[in-house]
Structure formats: structure tokens, C-alpha cells
Image (cartoon, rainbow, N blue to C red):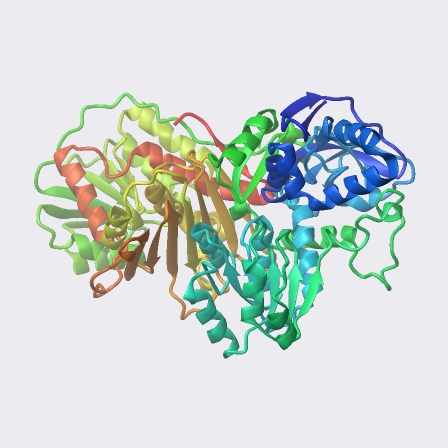
């Protein structure tokens, strides 16, 4: 099997072939699915290994003291041979993983072969294809939790144990100094526990990420904004507790902790930072300084870790194994979200190159995962789910420019058609409303009277066979969209279909079969938000990107009224299936690509969803689709972060773009005036569609993009059922 190792003397990193460990009693043999690189602890070890011997000595004075003690007892020659022998050996890396039990040792009865487990320990949860893990250092993974997320179990336990040392109380205010991997988890855990959190980090991207994940405010340690936020949240008293999750040799974190902590507050050291406590500051406030030892009680106790002797729960409530299980439970229930922390997933075969990229700074990351060969099949017991993105195969027929007027027919005249589409078309120069088709005679007559259609009918075939009709609008219930679109395409019409295009993969395939058969690809789906003037202007102000982006889209969808046909999931699909394409299309428009994978989780008991999309360049988009929010809160808010810039869109009413600092200070663009009403792009979209029909030019959105967005929307249902990320597979 293969394992990542390092020679501490030379600094060499290698992916070494080593023997498979035996399955000893009291533990299990685990085949790794994903292992997590601790971008703090592990990179520190890698960096130290590359130092000179003098540099190594300066970085580890504790080890130098042990060497000097050995010299006094054993003499210089013996000590030298011992030290050089230890340095010039391969040592392992890694301590947090998720994998599948391959063999069960004697005395183990809580898991069986094939079970998914999360594992901990810098001697047992290594970056290796197989690991032997003793009983108290693994725990079963809850049903539905993705293996890539369960691989965070150990670092989650470290964050959890640090918080337990701080003894937080509901309503308190906490300060987290250092917003790396551990700090980001501490922020989320504290927010989940009902605390208000202020974060500190010199990296603005990490500050933005922490705010998205629950922090009330974040900023640079030198910024007055941090002190202002603390003063505002605490009434000037100072925070109740400080969590030191920073590393390095600076003493600024402990000095900042003393300055911002209240009288008799608590300071908890989780990371490895300098702790030269300023005596007066800590004495005058009588600050309580505490240390958090790794994953929790049991750590470094060989009887607990190696022999499996548990501590009675009545005396030690939270051991390292119970912390591990607790963190996985929080992940499974959606109280903590690690997906936004994943900056990169590398194949295990590329482990050495990945470490080098991290060390050189070419890969900037909060969390990096190794993905092991065959992990999908072995981790979940079946092939990794995928949703096909069908290729668009069409020998295009010559497009007949409609000229003027453009004659339009509407199939359906419900609330959306009559309130959001037809008002923008009625009276538009060069447009003639030819025919309206509904299932009841009276609704057709009402639409004809109100909007001036030349004809009203209930006969769809008559409209499709009418050679004077240039384009057909499909604005019916969701379950009929795909079939009506298929028929209209085969009839040679340009088609505007309200979202969704299809509710199943078979329906989508049927639409594309009609495109291929007819040579007619003149199709537009009603994804109007990309046409919103405010969004387009903000995107232009934001400008081009050079690196991956993070996008957060909060949709405060609210509750539906009793009896709404949207609730007929059996026939009309879920709410997200019906309107989720809007938000996926908007994200793809801003990120300039179509997604390659989808991961979705849903809390039990409501329709809320968290959907994470990944894009080819490493960008991610997180769509929070919430039905349980306050109705008075704006429906849609969007944030895009990349290259030191932030775009903020507030419900299509106001937009802002923030730029990184310059000599002139922070630059910011804000939309110059508030529109009279929200403009979500319907008018601009219809204008673009009519223009394409009239001129014979390309449709406003490429068909390939419409198909990719539809496939991504369908993948949400697949992902919810499987509990793992879904690949969007197929030709593009």
C-alpha cells in the first residue's frame, strides 16, 4: 500500500510503498476514503523539516532541552547517534480521515466489515491507504453524512474540545483569533451554541468566510473595526472568552486577548502560538488562562487510546471518542457546514505535489482533502451517483428570421404569465400577441380581453400548426413543461418555457431528442435573473477574475399557502425542482461556467436545503434555500468573493462592489439609486428573446448552459437520496 512520509532530516516528502498493517485485537483495519490535510499543524512540520539544523533547533527548544539532558546522561557520541538516527528516518503525516472497515480485530463488536468510520490519531489516522485504528479512536459515521465531510472529524474534535474548555454560556460573546481551519470550525460551533462571535485574522478572505459561516463581525487584528464590534456587542465590557487558534511566533494574539477580554474572562489556547503573557494586563483583569489538549480527555493516555479502556461517562462526559461522535452528529444535522472550507480535493497519488504547492503558496487553502483510489465504491457501497448532462446534438436547420411583427402564442395564462410576462409584451413595438391557449374557455377569454390577443382557444394543435406563429410561450404547470416544449420544437417554433425545463432526466432527454430530430434548437428557459440590470452592472464593476471564487446565495423562500399546487410534489416536483434553476443559473452566470458537481443536504422536518455547487476552476457556490426564515427579511441576497473583491446584491434593489485596499484606502461602488421596484430581469430577458426571434440571431442563453443548469437542479434530488456529492457527467 502507499503512505505519505517525510524525512525530518532532509525534508524529503515521499509517497512510499509500505506493508499493509496487521489487524490487531481491540481495533479495526480501515481502508481510507478521504483524509484531511491539517493546513496548520502538518504544514508547520513540513516547513520545519526543510530548515537547517540550527533552524530546527530554534523552532523546537523543547526538543533541544531533551537532547541536552541526554548528553548529560549518555554523553555526546551516544546522543548524536540517537538524534541523527531519529531525524534520518521516515515519519508519517496525517491524523484525520474517513474510511471503510475492512477487517475487525478481536474484542470489537460495535462495527462490522463495510461500515463507514471516522478515525483520529497521528499514529493511526495517517495519510495511507490502510490504517489500523484502535477502538477509542474511531466512531461510526451517521447515515447520510458524506465521507469527505466525516474526514473532518478529528479537527472538529479539536475545535470542540477547545470550546468545552471555554465553558461558553448562551448569549455570551466570544473572540476567535486566527481563522484558519480550526478557527473557522470554532466560529461555527460557537454560533451553533448561541454565542455571538467576533473573528480576527489578517486575511480578508478568511474574515469574509467566517462571517458567511456565522460570525457577527471579523477583521484584521490591527483594524479598529474589531474593537468597535466588540464594544458594540458587549456594551463596552469586553468579550466573555477568547479562543487562540492562531500559530506563529508573534505575541500579538495574547496581547489582543487581554485588551478585548472582559474582567475575569477566559482565554483558551487551542493553537500553537507564542504565550508571553503580559503580566499586568492579565493580572489586573484576573484572566483565566486555559489550555485545550488536542481532541479531549484520553489523549496521550495509552490505556485509553491503545488498550481501549474507556472513562466512565459519569466522571468524564466528553472523551476524545465522544467528541468525535458529537462533531459528526453536528455535521449530520447541519449545525456545522464544512463544505465551504474545502478549497481543494487532490488525488492521493498527487500527495507530494499537493504538499509542495501548499508550502510554496501556490495553493492557498483552508482545508485540503486527499481522495483515495476507489473511494466512491468502497465508501458508500455503490457507484458514486452521477447525473448525465446530455450533449446537445443538432444539425441546425436554417433559421427563418421572423421580421416584424413577431407573432407570439401563449400556452397558459396563469398568475405568473399575466403578472410578470404579458405586461412586458403588451404594446411592445414589433410584437403581436397572436393566440392564447388555456385548458378552460373562460380563462382564455379573460386573457384575450385583458392583453389583446387576436385569438383565444383551447386547441393546442391548432396553434402549433399555425404557420403565422413565430414563437410559443409555455407557461403552464411544471409537469407539462417538457412535453409541451418538445411538441413546439418539433413544430418548428421558437420556444420560451418558464422554469423548469424538465422534472426528470428522461424528460430532459426527450426535449433534446426533439431538438436533434427537428434541427430546431431555438429554446429559451425563463432564467431571468441573469438579465437583471443591477446584477449585470455589478458584475461589470466586479470585473474579470484571476482565481477561484466563493459565492453565497441566500433564498428566503418562505412558506407556501395551504392548497398551493407547488405543494403537489408527486406530480409537480419539489419546490426546489421548480425554481432552483433560477439560482443555479444566476450563480453560473456570475462564475462564467457550468457546475461539475452538486452536493445537497436538508434538515429533517422542513423544506430547507443547502446546495453546494463546484465549478471547473475550483470555484464554489452555496445556495441556502430556506422556507423557515422571517417573512420580513429580503427574499434573495447574494455575495461573490474573489481576488480581494466582494460583490453584494440585496434582493435586486441595491448592489455594492468592494475592492481591496489601495493607497487611497478601501474603494467601494454602490448602485447610484434605488430602482422604483425590484427588477429581476424579466423585461430584459423578453426583449432579448424577441430580438433573437425577429433577427434569427442566437438565443440569449446557449442551449448547452440551459441543459447543464437543468441537470444540476435534478442532481439535487439525487444527492439528497444518496447523501454524497453528485457528479455532473457528460459531454459539454
Q: Position of residue 577 (x, y in %)?
A: 45, 47
The residue lying toward the viewer, choosing from 589 and 205, is 205
| Residue ID at (58%, 68%) | 258
Q: Position of residue 451 (x, y in %)?
A: 17, 57
Q: Is residue 441 visible?
A: no
Q: Is residue 173 visible?
A: yes
Q: Position of residue 483 (x, y in %)?
A: 37, 38
Judged left or right of residue 31, residue 452 is left
Judged left or right of residue 369, residue 101 is right
Above or below, 459 against 616 in this view is below
Q: Position of residue 166 (x, y in %)?
A: 68, 65
| Residue ID at (51%, 53%) | 609
Which image quarter holds the N terminus? top right
Which image quarter holds the C terminus? top left
Quarter assignment of residue 605: bottom right
The residue lying toward the viewer, choosing from 483 and 443, is 483
Above or below, 36 against 350 in this view is below
The residue lying toward the viewer, choosing from 113 and 213, is 213
Amino acid at each position: 500500500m502507499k503512505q505519505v512520509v517525510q524525512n525530518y532530516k532532509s525534508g524529503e516528502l515521499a509517497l512510499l510503498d509500505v506493508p499493509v498493517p496487521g489487524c490487531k485485537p481491540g481495533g479495526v483495519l480501515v481502508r481510507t476514503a478521504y483524509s484531511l490535510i491539517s493546513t496548520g499543524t502538518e504544514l508547520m512540520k513540513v516547513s520545519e523539516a526543510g530548515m537547517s539544523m540550527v533552524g530546527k533547533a530554534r523552532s523546537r527548544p523543547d526538543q533541544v532541552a531533551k537532547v541536552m539532558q541526554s548528553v548529560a546522561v549518555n554523553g555526546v557520541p551516544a546522543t548524536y547517534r540517537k538524534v541523527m538516527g531519529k531525524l534520518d528516518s521516515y515519519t508519517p503525516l496525517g491524523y484525520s480521515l474517513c474510511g471503510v472497515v475492512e477487517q475487525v480485530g478481536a474484542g470489537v463488536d460495535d462495527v462490522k466489515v463495510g461500515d463507514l468510520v471516522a478515525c483520529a490519531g497521528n499514529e493511526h489516522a495517517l495519510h495511507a491507504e490502510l490504517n489500523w485504528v484502535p477502538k477509542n479512536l474511531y466512531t461510526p459515521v451517521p447515515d447520510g453524512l458524506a465521507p469527505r465531510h466525516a474526514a473532518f472529524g478529528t479537527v472538529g474534535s479539536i475545535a470542540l474540545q477547545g470550546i468545552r474548555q471555554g465553558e461558553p454560556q448562551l448569549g455570551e460573546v466570544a473572540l476567535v483569533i486566527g481563522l484558519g481551519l480550526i478557527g473557522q470550525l470554532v466560529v461555527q460551533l460557537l454560533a451553533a451554541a448561541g454565542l455571538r462571535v467576533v473573528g480576527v485574522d489578517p486575511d480578508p478572505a478568511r474574515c469574509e468566510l467566517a462571517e458567511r459561516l456565522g460570525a457577527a463581525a471579523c477583521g484584521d487584528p490591527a483594524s479598529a473595526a474589531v474593537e468597535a464590534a466588540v464594544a458594540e456587542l458587549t456594551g463596552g465590557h469586553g468579550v466573555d472568552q477568547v479562543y487562540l487558534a492562531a500559530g506563529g511566533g508573534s505575541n500579538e494574539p495574547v496581547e489582543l486577548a487581554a485588551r478585548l477580554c472582559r474582567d475575569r474572562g477566559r482565554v483558551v489556547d487551542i493553537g500553537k502560538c507564542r504565550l508571553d503573557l503580559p503580566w499586568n494586563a492579565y493580572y489586573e483583569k484576573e484572566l483565566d488562562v486555559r489550555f485545550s489538549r488536542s481532541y479531549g480527555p484520553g489523549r496521550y493516555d495509552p490505556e485509553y487510546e491503545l488498550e481501549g479502556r474507556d472513562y466512565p461517562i459519569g466522571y468524564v462526559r466528553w472523551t476524545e471518542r465522544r467528541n468525535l461522535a458529537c462533531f459528526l452528529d453536528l455535521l449530520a444535522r447541519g449545525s456545522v457546514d464544512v463544505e465551504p472550507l474545502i478549497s481543494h480535493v487532490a488525488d492521493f497519488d498527487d500527495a507530494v505535489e499537493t504538499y509542495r504547492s501548499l508550502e510554496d503558496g501556490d495553493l492557498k487553502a483552508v482545508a485540503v482533502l486527499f481522495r483515495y483510489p476507489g473511494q466512491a465504491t468502497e465508501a458508500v457501497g455503490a457507484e458514486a451517483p452521477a447525473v448525465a448532462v446530455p450533449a446537445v446534438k443538432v444539425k441546425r436547420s436554417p433559421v427563418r428570421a421572423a421580421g416584424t411583427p413577431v407573432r407570439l402564442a401563449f400556452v397558459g395564462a396563469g398568475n405568473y404569465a399575466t403578472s410578470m410576462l404579458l405586461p412586458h409584451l403588451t404594446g411592445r413595438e414589433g410584437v403581436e400577441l397572436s393566440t392564447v391557449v388555456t385548458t378552460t374557455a373562460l380563462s382564455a377569454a379573460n386573457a384575450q380581453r385583458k392583453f389583446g390577443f387576436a385569438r383565444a382557444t383551447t386547441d393546442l394543435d391548432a396553434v402549433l400548426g399555425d404557420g403565422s406563429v413565430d414563437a410559443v410561450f409555455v407557461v403552464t404547470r411544471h409537469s407539462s413543461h417538457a412535453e409541451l416544449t418538445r411538441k413546439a420544437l418539433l413544430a418548428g417554433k421558437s420556444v420560451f418555457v418558464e422554469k423548469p425545463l424538465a422534472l426528470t432526466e428522461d424528460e430532459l432527454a426527450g426535449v433534446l431528442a426533439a431538438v436533434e430530430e427537428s434541427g430546431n434548437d431555438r429554446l429559451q428557459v425563463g432564467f431571468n435573473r441573469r438579465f437583471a440590470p443591477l446584477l449585470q452592472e455589478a458584475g461589470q464593476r466586479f470585473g474579470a477574475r484571476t482565481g477561484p471564487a466563493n459565492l453565497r446565495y441566500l433564498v428566503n423562500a418562505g412558506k407556501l399557502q395551504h392548497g398551493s399546487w407547488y405543494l403537489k410534489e408527486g406530480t409537480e416536483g419539489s419546490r426546489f425542482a421548480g425554481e432552483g434553476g433560477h439560482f443555479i443559473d444566476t450563480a453560473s452566470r456570475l462564475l462564467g461556467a457550468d457546475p461539475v458537481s452538486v452536493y445537497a443536504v436538508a434538515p429533517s422536518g422542513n423544506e430547507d436545503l443547502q446546495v453546494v455547487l463546484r465549478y471547473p476552476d475550483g470555484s464554489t457556490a452555496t445556495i441556502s434555500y430556506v422556507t423557515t426564515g422571517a417573512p420580513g427579511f429580503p427574499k434573495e441576497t447574494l455575495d461573490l468573493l474573489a481576488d480581494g473583491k466582494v460583490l453584494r446584491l440585496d434582493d435586486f434593489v441595491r448592489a455594492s462592489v468592494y475592492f481591496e485596499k489601495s493607497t487611497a484606502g478601501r474603494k467601494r461602488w454602490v448602485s447610484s439609486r434605488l430602482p422604483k421596484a425590484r427588477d429581476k430581469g424579466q423585461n430584459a430577458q423578453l426583449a432579448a428573446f424577441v430580438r433573437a426571434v425577429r433577427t434569427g440571431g442566437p438565443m440569449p442563453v446557449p442551449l448547452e448552459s440551459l441543459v447543464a443548469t437543468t441537470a444540476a437542479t435534478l442532481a439535487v434530488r439525487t444527492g439528497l437520496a444518496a447523501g454524497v456529492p453528485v457528479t455532473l457527467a457528460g459531454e459539454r
